[in-house]
Amino acid sequence: MSPESRKKIQLLLAAGIAIAALRTGYILYERHEDNATPVKKEAPPLKADYYVTPMKLHSYDLKSAKDLTKQPVWVKEGYRYTYYPYNAARHSSDFAHEVGTLGPIERLEIKDVVTDITPGASDQKQVMAVFEKDGKSYSFPIGSVQGSDFRIYSDDMLFIQDPKDLYKHWSSEVWDAIDKHEVRPGMNQLQASFAVGMGTPDNLHDASNRTVNYPNGGKPLTVIFQNDKAVSVNQGS
């Protein structure tokens, strides 16, 4: 074998050894990465609103429901619950004449909780919360009773703590808008509902990005939310 051929073979062998070494190193690296402890990605922090836990009465009969009279209450979702004239002497509500709907975060002093007839249902009664407004007595339903079976849903309807204390992490600008029943850009959907009451979203699959129509007590609004922030507020129809 000539010296030139021997040199070529030596170069080929050296190149092969180098390639094999690189491949071995790469395999060992991959195995190390596979066995390494995976780095946990931290979930984004929850919004402060999620940590708010309003107190509940868990009323189960007429006596326990009367605990609503022990402190002021605030309406959770405005323009949703109808109230009626109440005749204290007769202990009866005038279901034939609706007065209106309770307003957003309206503060009420419940004077009594009573049972009353259910129009069109002789075997069932309504549980009514009685309050006064402008010197007159009114009532609105907070549950029903059939026989001895009470179903009371006031915990879903009313706060028994001042919302400004519950959501004290909201800015003064947000509370100013709520007090004035305005929806302003940057407000989230909960804040908007505190300001203008119940709304109807255009979708139920994406809670953060949607358009919500608010009846707003006869002054309808259409609000577009992106990432749960109002980006457009317009008068509705």
Image (tube, rainbow, N blue to C red):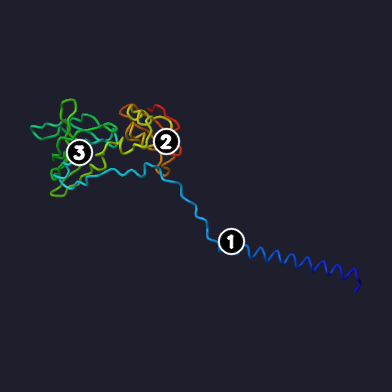
Please name the amino acid that badge 3 sits on: Pro
Most distant residue in the right direction: 2
Q: Which mark is residue 141?
A: 3
Location of mark 1 (residue): 33
In the rendered image, residue 157, in percent from the top left (x then y), is placed at 26, 40
Image quadrant in which the C terminus is located: top left
Q: CA distance from mark 1 to mark 2?
A: 46 Å
Under tag 1, what secondary structure? helix
* Pointer 2 local density, CA inside 10 Å: few below 14, some 14–19, many at least 20: many
Residue at 29% in and 43% down: 54
Please name the amino acid that badge 1 sits on: Glu
Q: Nearer the viewer, residue 84 or 132?
A: 132
| Residue 228 position (above or below residue 237) | below
- Disc 1 versus disc 2: nearer the observer: 1
| Residue 1 position (above or below residue 114) | below
Discs 1, 2 touching: Cβ within 8 Å: no
Location of mark 2 (residue): 211
Of pointers 3 and 1, the one earlier in the residue sequence: 1
| Residue 8 position (above or below residue 54) | below
* Pointer 3 local density, CA inside 10 Å: few below 14, some 14–19, many at least 20: many
Q: CA distance from mark 3 to mark 1?
A: 63 Å
Q: Which mark is residue 8?
A: none
Please name the amino acid that badge 2 sits on: Thr
Q: Is residue 144 left or right of residue 28?
A: left
Q: Is residue 26 left or right of residue 225?
A: right
